[in-house]
Image (tube, coloured by chain):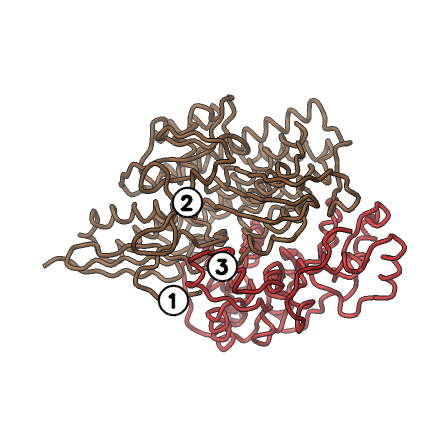
Amino acid sequence: MGKSIRVDVEYLTRVEGHGNIVVDVRDGTLRECRLEIIESPRFFEGMLRGRSIFEAQHITSRICGICACAHSLASIQAAEEAIGFVPSEQTVKLRKFLLDIEILDSHVLHIYFLVAPDLFGAKSFVPLVETHNAVVRRALRLKKTCNDVCDILVGRHVHPISCTVGGFTKLPRPGDLEKMRSLLLGMIPDLEATVDLVRGFRFPEFERETEYVALVSDDDEYPLLMGDIGSTDGVRLPKKDYRKITNEFVVPHSTAKHTHLSRDSYMVGALARLNLNYPKLHPRAKEIADLFGMHRKVTNPYLNTVAQLVECFHCLYHAVGIVEEFLERGLDYNEEIVVGLNEKQRIPVRAGSGVGAVEAPRGTLYHHYEVDDHGRIVHANCVIPTGQNLRNIEYDMRKLVPEILDRSEEEIQLALEMLVRAYDPCISCSTHFLNVTFVGRENPKGS
Amino acid sequence: MMKAPKVAFFDFTCCEGCQLQVANLGEELLELLKFLDLVEFRETMSERWDGIYDIAIIEGSITTPHDVERIKRIRQRSKTLIAYGSCATIGGVNGMKNAFDLEEILRYVYGEGARFFTTLPTRPVHEVVPVEYFVHGCPVYQPEFLEVLKCALLGIPYHVPDVAVCVECKFNENVCFYERGLTCLGPITRAGCNSWCINNGNICYGCRGMVSNPNERGFLEVLERYGVRVEFLVRRMDMYNACRILKGAGKGHGEEHTR
């Protein structure tokens, strides 16, 4: 007689957003395995219609509090392309800096608050305050420092203020640059200690090769803010063709859509970026990667957490490089630009279409706007990283569950929760639900 | 010593950035945890609590039938409710959808998947259940949150500043955007954020909601002096304040968008 289990984890915790895992095994056969998203729909793409393109960044930043800067940067890129504005070199560098800090901040949150409790056998960071006080303090310190840097550059991390279409409304003064530099350098000992922490974790052994998708480029810089879209299966397309990458399609058992590229599913995020762009990492980040054997292609999704650690180092040193460059040559303060809602037509506007593609902490994020000749948005689309990963998570679960069926339900449940958390899913981001599977269900929960 | 009060965070329709503002407190958070027993915080905790909450902190707007049921259940189990962040206190950016035909916006975003979802007009929390404290802002301003939390723990009232953002903006010595040829919602928006956006070179978008008794005549004079049409400003206000502006009004989205 085969084993029968039913795991139904409602309100998957320690992910940003609301998710359910449903696994149904009867007589030793996996009948069903899915990740449900029950976040309330928010309709950002619908609400943007009719609004000024100069409001898009402000509004779409509010899609996600965790990666508000990445949404802002994708939005600005799409908006500027749509109206034909080309940002200055200084602006682009500062945006790269901001994205570095965003990724660093988000990865720290994920490693310490969302993953570490599992590996310490705790339910959350709260019991760790007692048992691992130094670790919790280090985590809070790292998080706070990223926040402090963002405060200086863009006013705050959650919903950045000064980074808008056209450039920055306020540029850091030399003292600010010094301060950011010293804050960042001050993080190094804590980050090095994080390496020891992560080396102490035992990640579940599980392999499933898939297609990995991330930005790629021809220059030497690890591409995060700009590039074409590439995959480990050899696909390379300009960002305007993002729909050919995300390929939303209808699955037989559902009218809701999934995404795929060359195979059944693909993965985005830190692990995908490492698999595609390892050679371009900062030397210190490369050393960390090598320490964990990540110099070759990694196919264990649990190791996404380690890939995030590697990127923490890359982003930190890359950001320090930018700040030091500006400390040396100075910033051009004439570039400070206050556009507001472009009432005085400070930035010329034309009708057009633009796509922003940036590497958010969790993977490639797309914003796409079409504007009319008054700069009003007539069409908007956002494709978020978690949406692209959902199908891949389900394929992982389908391979994983039969491999661990001999374990207790609690262990299986934990293994699945840890798998989902390894992807760092940001479900509050799910601006639309096209990637959710609803099996035999008239009306999903939470809708 | 008194038993630590049980405090829980709940998120509804929102970006969860206001919850993140708590994690962003840094080591200060550990000081805070000495005075309360954090029993639920789904974004970073797996723990659940099945008793009475002394303080429930609610993030997000109420936008689905499920939200309505859930907030009512939480209210029944909570001694004190704090609406936390603009989505919860005034509907925030979620309110923008109220200007659209909800069926139409569902189809636009979800296409053939639209039938899986039901959506209600966005409401702030206090329009569904009674609320004791309000922390406005998108996101919340941490010093104000700590102040409100202190009041809630002590059981004393917190009065949201009911003066315009301009008051704080003047203290911060910012040059007025109207003088710089731009419009700004500071003159009619509640203070309490320390003019956060204007300090950083941007305009005020009205995220904390309008003051209860705006100086309409004075503001109309300002608009006239700088040649700004009222409709233009109203159109700007609906980014955060649509729930209030559209309340009782019919659908319609056809106003002018350019000045």
Image colour assigned to chain A? brown
Nearer the observer: mark 3 or 2; the answer is 3
Horizontal side of A93 relative to B109 (left or right) equals: right
- Residue at (43%, 28%) from the top-left corner? A277
Query: Picture coordinates of residue A102 (x, y %)?
Result: 55, 41
Looking at the rendered structure, the kind of residue marked 1 is Asn
Q: Quadrant of residue A409?
A: bottom left
Nearer the observer: mark 2 or 1; the answer is 1
Looking at the rendered structure, the kind of residue marked 3 is Arg
Q: Quadrant of the N terminus of chain A?
A: bottom left
Residue A446 seen by the camera: yes
Q: Which label was assigned to residue A443?
A: 1
User: Of residues B63 and B12, which is closer to you in this image?
Assistant: B63
**Mark 3 belongs to chain:** B
Mark 1: secondary structure: loop
Label 1, label 3: how far apart the Cα atoms are: 16 Å
**Number of other residues with Cα within 10 Å of mark 1, as a class: few under 14, some 14 to 19, many 20 or more:** few
Vertical order, A220 against A249 (above or below): above
Looking at the rendered structure, the kind of residue marked 2 is Gln
User: Of residues B131 and A441, which is closer to you in this image?
Assistant: A441
Residue B150 seen by the camera: no
Mark 2: secondary structure: helix
**Number of other residues with Cα within 10 Å of mark 3, as a class: few under 14, some 14 to 19, many 20 or more:** some
Colour red, chain: B
User: Would you name the residue on which mark 3 appears?
Assistant: B107
Query: Picture coordinates of residue B70 (x, y %)?
Result: 47, 71
User: Would you name the residue on which mark 2 appears?
Assistant: A388
Q: Quadrant of residue A7?
A: bottom left
**Number of other residues with Cα within 10 Å of mark 2, as a class: few under 14, some 14 to 19, many 20 or more:** many
Vertical order, A191 against B115 (above or below): above
**Mark 1 belongs to chain:** A
